[in-house]
């Protein structure tokens, strides 16, 4: 058990021995909305966004929140009101942005290796800021779509800078063997091609080296390479106005997180190599803004033991939070009701899904738990709900946004009828 009375303030903290989200006791939310339940702290998202923005100070920039991290409309609206732009990777994510506010499209960048012609056309209609293009073939499709729409498309080629990152192999993206972007050596040839197209505007360069990166050096290295490319392109006669530095800033999944300091260090790493270049910087943070702002609330159903192990079976499974099995990710799990000095035991916290990989924690020291009690899985605000599935025909959790003493349901629990909609027998 965490001995600190305060966890991840201002979002999740113990008051009177009871874990709260801001001023709302979590057991009340569980009683009102059921479990499993995603709970988000609006104040935490707001404070993290502001700290990130402050870190970039007076540098001309737009923070394009990466929608894939958490795409609930209420999260998007909150960030949009704070002045965020957005990074989308599908027609579906673009549709979410248009639903939040049609004008939000002006600050949308569209990333992704496999955009279809229909998705590109939707982006052109919406008048988005930038297409981050990942291949020569995609350039050709974009040129055709833009000509048909008679709209000039701003293009940032996504270059692959061949940078090593110490993160899980599934979320590292900046090496030659990865499917993302075009090799940085190819960029000059491709920019010459872009310039020949009437409906393409070679406006920027984009880069994204991976996710959950906590060492700042790879970011700096990537920007050094990008800055060098911008100078080469200038010599070739292109005026690059935008650099998109991508996302990837990691968070601490073990608790101690001085986010303003971390954001400062990140901004330093990104900005220093760009000194002297007249560009508008785009940033695509996802996890860093919303990860620590969310928890997954789950109830203990059963406790059982065999000769080797003690299993705590909870009502949230890998379909609700897949990160532990997919990336061997660690999420801190704490009892909602705090108690001092209780005995601890090593347990596996597992879900109800019919898969051995259905666990939230393995070999974890936990205070003695009882059936029926509530647990909170922390730092689940990013890539939690957005990666949830209906496996085992389990409805996805409800989501609640807390602000101060108020809680608002921002997505109701999915029902069996929801899940069968669209099917025919
Ligand atoms: N921009 C691009 C082009 C991206 O591919 C990503 C994430 C981001 C921005 C945002 O990255 P962030 O700031 O959130 O690290 N599901 C995995 C993470 C996958 C990240 C995919 N791309 C996880 O749960 O760890």
Image (cartoon, rainbow, N blue to C red):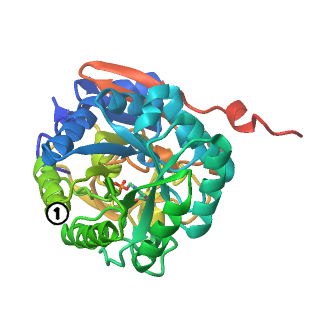
Picture mark count:
1
Q: Quadrant of residue 251?
A: bottom left
* Front one among 333 and 301: 333
The reply to whether residue 144 is visible in this rendering is yes
| Residue 279 spot, x, y in % from top left | 25, 53
Residue at 69% of width from left, 38% of height from top?
A: 419
Of residue 203 and residue 398, the one placed in the foreground of this image is: 203
Residue at 72% from the left image edge and 31% from the top image edge: 417
Residue 338 in sight here = no
Residue 117 coordinates in the image, percent (x, y): 67, 51
As displayed, is residue 155 above or below residue 7? below
Secondary element under disc 1, as helix, strand or loop, is: helix
Q: Quadrant of residue 272?
A: bottom left
Above or below, 180 against 147 in this view is below
Quarter of the rendering occupied by the C terminus: top right
Image side of residue 10 versus residue 348, left or right = left
Image coords of residue 27 (percent x, y): 34, 29
The spot of residue 89 in percent (x, y) is 52, 51
In this rendering, position of residue 292 left or right of residue 15: right
Sort mark 1 into few (<14), some (14-19) or many (20+) by Cα contacts within 10 Å. many
Which residue has dot 1 on it? Answer: 269
Q: Residue at x 17, y 52 (%)?
A: 263
Judge: label 1 CB < 8 Å from ligand 1: no
């Amino acid at each position: 058990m965490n001995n600190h009375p305060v966890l991840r303030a201002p979002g999740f903290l113990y008051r009177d021995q009871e874990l709260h989200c801001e001023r709302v006791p979590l057991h009340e939310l569980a009683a009102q909305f059921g479990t499993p339940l995603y709970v988000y702290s609006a104040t935490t998202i707001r404070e993290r966004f502001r700290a990130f923005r402050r870190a970039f100070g007076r540098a001309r920039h737009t923070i394009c929140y990466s929608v894939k991290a958490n795409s609930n409309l209420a999260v998007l609206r909150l960030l949009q009101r704070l002045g965020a732009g957005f990074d989308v990777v599908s027609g579906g994510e673009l549709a979410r942005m248009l639903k939040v506010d049609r004008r939000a499209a002006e600050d949308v960048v569209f990333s992704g290796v496999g955009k279809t012609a229909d998705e590109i056309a939707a982006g052109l209609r919406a008048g988005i800021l930038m297409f981050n293009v990942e291949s020569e073939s995609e350039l050709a499709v974009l040129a055709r779509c833009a000509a048909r729409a008679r709209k000039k498309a701003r293009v940032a080629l996504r270059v692959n800078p061949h940078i090593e990152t110490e993160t899980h192999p599934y979320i590292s993206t900046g090496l030659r063997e990865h499917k993302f972007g075009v090799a940085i050596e190819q960029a000059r040839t491709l920019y010459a091609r872009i310039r020949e197209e009437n409906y393409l505007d070679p406006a920027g360069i984009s880069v994204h080296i991976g996710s959950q990166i906590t060492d700042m050096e790879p970011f700096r290295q990537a920007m050094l390479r990008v800055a060098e490319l911008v100078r080469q392109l200038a010599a070739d006669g292109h005026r690059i106005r935008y650099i998109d530095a991508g996302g990837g800033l990691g968070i601490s999944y073990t608790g101690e997180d001085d986010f303003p300091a971390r954001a400062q260090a990140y901004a330093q790493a990104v900005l220093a190599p760009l000194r002297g270049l007249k560009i508008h910087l785009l940033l695509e943070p996802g996890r860093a803004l919303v990860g620590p702002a969310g928890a997954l609330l789950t109830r203990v159903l059963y406790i059982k033991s065999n000769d080797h192990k003690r299993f705590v079976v909870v009502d949230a499974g890998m379909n609700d939070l897949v990160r532990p099995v997919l990336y061997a990710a660690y999420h801190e799990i704490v009892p909602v009701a705090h108690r001092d000095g209780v005995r601890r035991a090593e347990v596996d916290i597992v879900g109800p899904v019919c898969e051995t990989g259905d666990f939230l924690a393995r070999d974890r020291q936990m205070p003695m738990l009882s059936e029926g009690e509530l647990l909170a899985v922390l730092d689940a605000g990013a890539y939690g709900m957005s990666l949830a599935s209906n496996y085992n025909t389990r409805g996805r959790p409800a989501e609640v946004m807390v602000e101060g003493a108020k809680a608002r349901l921002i997505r109701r629990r999915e029902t069996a009828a929801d899940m069968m909609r669209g099917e025919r027998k």
